Amino acid sequence: MTNSNADVLAINSVRGDEYFTLEKDVCIIADNLIPELNIWCPFDTEESRFPHVLREYGHTVTATSSDFFTTEPPPGCNAVVSNPPFSRKKEILQRLKDLNLPFALILPFLFLNDGVPLDYGHQIMLFRKRIHFVIPEIGELNKPRTNCFVLSNGILKNNFTIVRK
């Protein structure tokens, strides 16, 4: 997600739900994806780290930064990779299921307690250390209260990965 995304913030999340993923963490995710995907980054602009890094790893990427719930996936898209608004995680997973699109999404670790994620994905990537995000309004790293994980339903190289970063 990038800080030029103010209009999307109102549509896709609640105020304060906009955090930008650090490039090093996007690289870790990209390094664990299967090769040659045609990826849709629906929560990102072209200036975001996700499209930039994913292209460096050889993927075709379209960043739309429009309303995820009304925008159709780009032609040829066969995966979604992003850091979605955590406040709408259940709705986002349901839409991805309805679209029948493979995905890899950063989600809050405590979401695993709900049991809901396992209804949508069977691949999990855990980070040994907490992922930090940039708070766009002030441009500083946040101090996350919990760790995050990546949930996927078929585009990670392994079903279970622990990242030692």
Image: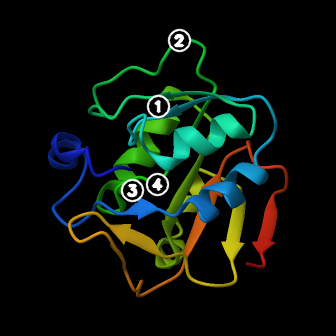
Q: Which residue is drawn at 30% across and 69% down?
A: 139
- Position of residue 133 measured from the top left corner of the image (x, y, whole percent): 43, 70
Q: Distance between the residues labelled 4 and 2?
A: 21 Å
Q: What element carries label 1?
A: helix
Q: How far apart are marks 1 and 4 (CA)?
A: 19 Å
The residue under label 1 is which amino acid type? Asp
Which of pointers 3 and 1 indicates the residue nearer the eye? 3
The residue under label 4 is which amino acid type? Asn
Residue tagged 4 = 83
**Which circle's residue, 4 or 2, is located before the other in the chain?**
2
Q: Which residue is drawn at 33% across and 35% down?
A: 65
Residue tagged 1 = 98
On the question of residue 81 being in view, the answer is no
**Quarter of the image that includes the C terminus:** bottom right
- State the residue in front, 101 or 42: 42
- Position of residue 125 measured from the top left corner of the image (x, y, whole percent): 71, 65
Crowd band around label 3 with a 10 angstrom C-alpha radius: few (<14), some (14–19), many (20+): some
Residue tagged 3 = 89
Crowd band around label 4 with a 10 angstrom C-alpha radius: few (<14), some (14–19), many (20+): many
Crowd band around label 1 with a 10 angstrom C-alpha radius: few (<14), some (14–19), many (20+): few
Q: Distance between the residues labelled 3 and 2?
A: 24 Å
**Which circle's residue, 3 or 2, is located before the other in the chain?**
2
The residue under label 2 is which amino acid type? Pro
Q: Residue at x 39, y 55 (%)?
A: 90
- State the residue in front, 120 or 137: 137
Residue tagged 2 = 75
Which of pointers 2 and 1 indicates the residue nearer the eye? 2
Which of pointers 1 and 4 indicates the residue nearer the eye? 4
- State the residue in front, 60 or 114: 60
Q: Residue at x 28, y 52 (%)?
A: 3
